[in-house]
Image (spheres, rainbow, N blue to C red):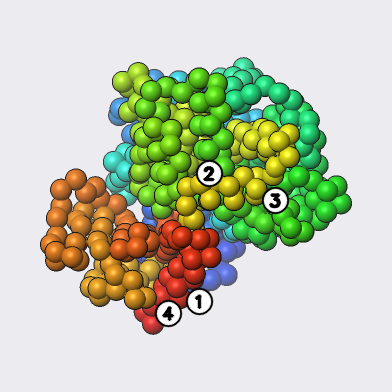
Amino acid sequence: MDIEKIYRTWVENVNYKELLDELKKIENDEKIKTEIFYKNIEFGTAGLRGIIGAGTNRMNIYTVRLATQALSNYLNENYKNPSVVISYDSRKNSKKFSYEASAVLAANNIKVYITEKLQPTPFLSFCVRNLKCSAGIMITASHNTAEYNGYKCYGEDGAQISEDISKKIYDIMCKIDVFKDINICNFKDMFEKNIISFVPKSTYENYLKKVYEQRLQNFPISNLKVVYTPLNGAGNDFVKKVLSSSGVDIFSVKSQEMPDENFSTCPYPNPEIYEAFSEAIKVSKKVNSDLILATDPDSDRLGVCIKSNGKYKVLSGNEIAILLFNYIIEQRKKLNSLENNPIVIKTIVSTPMIDEIAKAYDCIVLNVFTGFKNIAAEILKLEKVGEESRYIFGFEESNGYLTGTYVRDKDAVSAALIFCEMASYYKYKNKNVIDVLSELYEQYGYFSEKTLSYHLDGQDGLNKIQKIIDFFINYREKNIMNLEISKIYNYFRGEIFNLETNEITYDGVKKSKALEFCLKNKSKIIIRPSGTEPKVKFYLLSRGRSMNESLVEIDNLVRFISKTVMKIL
């Protein structure tokens, strides 16, 4: 690859001053030039995601146009009169990228619906189905830091596109010249001709109606004080509306209420971490709230923070899921609204405690690979055979939840509403959710989980991530921290290695970018590269006879992973 030639092509063709100035500034910096041009930004199963800036390996108007031209070609080849709906979050250039994508689609004779302002990812998923569109585009980088943006692509079922379709679109991208082969028109002209139009108001009303339908009981949630922060993102309007109309006493975090592309008070706007709640905790201390809710910038993930024994505790994604699932299935059983053989769907890296709760209610658990699109795929299978109503809950440990089938991605708006209903219900019984969680551990077993992430940027980081994965693919020790390994699931190769019999089998093992170490004491280590960030992630899961024993087990596994990764790097 001739990096200098590609660089010169960009300098000669880019006509946006901000990007051109950036390119000229690095004229003599070979390291940065290589970093931004050594590959094309990949169109994966989550679409595009990358650092904002000039270059083929960056998020900018040219890479957005390129991806959209490829999507347009795919849609025109596979659909008669295709249509696409587009939304965006609060990130830098999100609105601009959404308008650029609209202009490319319209120039390719594709009808476009676009939201008038930023909206949550689950609403975009709903729009695809409600407007009967061929595809959807959400401009977002979810919970990444401020220098990132992204481009999530959805299929006609409202779920993120499959790996097969994303590969087809990426193959088309690779054949397109970003400066010569893009069809683009004037957004304003196409808007006046109604080829581009705003999402109808009725669609917003239909979405809200479906969210309200997720409630299990209709009592007013008037005994609950809640501090809510959208973390400067897209959740503010919808979340506040559904909570306030249900009776919740809501307190805003003013510094994080409105969009802020720099995320000034929450540099890492991820509701999984304690730091994201720092501003909200200040408000909570003043108003003495029952709980704090946070949604990430595109409002598909929900975080919860509870005051317990004088301290503020951020619930893990698994803990939120345990509470929600138990409440939903318990209440539906009481209300006689459970189908025969109800189904809960979770990812393989999520807590196995769900399996224990499910057994008590004759509920089937489906385990899928990481990514909510895999949960959506199972819902679609149920829908096709008329058994959609059997689905009662789906989740992934990274704070993504879905209680209904009206959207096909995680929805923090409905999750916030159901969590508040649940907290209010328990408060009427003089309990808080921490009390309930403790009772559930006593009833179903003491499970602990922890996720370790190693963020490794750039081409060198990519090589290091591969080095770590290769080490564990070839790991053949019999033990981890004096704990015997029983099986290793190598999903990369679609095989199971049984260490007790020393046999490798292949039957029924699907392929994915993951490894799973099963220990004889039922603990697990699952390793996978992130599909959206330059990270390798380790998911540690354990079960003990007490919570202390379970936590000690996790600590031992953390030490093993930390020492091993340090040696590899």
Q: Is residue 303 left or right of residue 338?
A: right
Q: How far across and how far down the image is residue 520, in percent?
A: 30, 63
Looking at the picture, which amino acid does disc 1 mark?
Asn
Using the image, tell me which numbered label, if any, was put on residue 28. Answer: 1
Looking at the picture, which amino acid does disc 3 mark?
Ile
Q: Residues within 10 Å of mark 4 (few under 14, many from 20)?
A: few
Q: Residues within 10 Å of mark 2 (few under 14, many from 20)?
A: many
Looking at the picture, which amino acid does disc 2 mark?
Ala
For the residues labelled 2 and 3, the Cα–Cα distance comes to 15 Å
For marks 3 and 4, the one nearer the N-term is: 3
Looking at the picture, does residue 264 appear above or below residue 389? below
For the residues labelled 1 and 3, the Cα–Cα distance comes to 52 Å
For the residues labelled 4 and 2, the Cα–Cα distance comes to 31 Å
Looking at the picture, does residue 407 appear above or below residue 43? above
For marks 1 and 4, the one nearer the N-term is: 1
The residue where tag 3 is placed is 306
Do the residues bearing badges 4 and 2 touch, measured as CB atoms within 8 Å?
no
Q: How far across and how far down the image is residue 469, in percent?
A: 32, 67
User: Which residue is at the front of the view, 92 or 229?
Assistant: 229
Q: How far across and how far down the image is residue 7, in percent?
A: 44, 64
Q: Secondary structure at mark 4?
A: helix
Q: Nearer the viewer, mark 1 or mark 2?
A: 2
The residue where tag 2 is placed is 321
For the residues labelled 1 and 4, the Cα–Cα distance comes to 39 Å
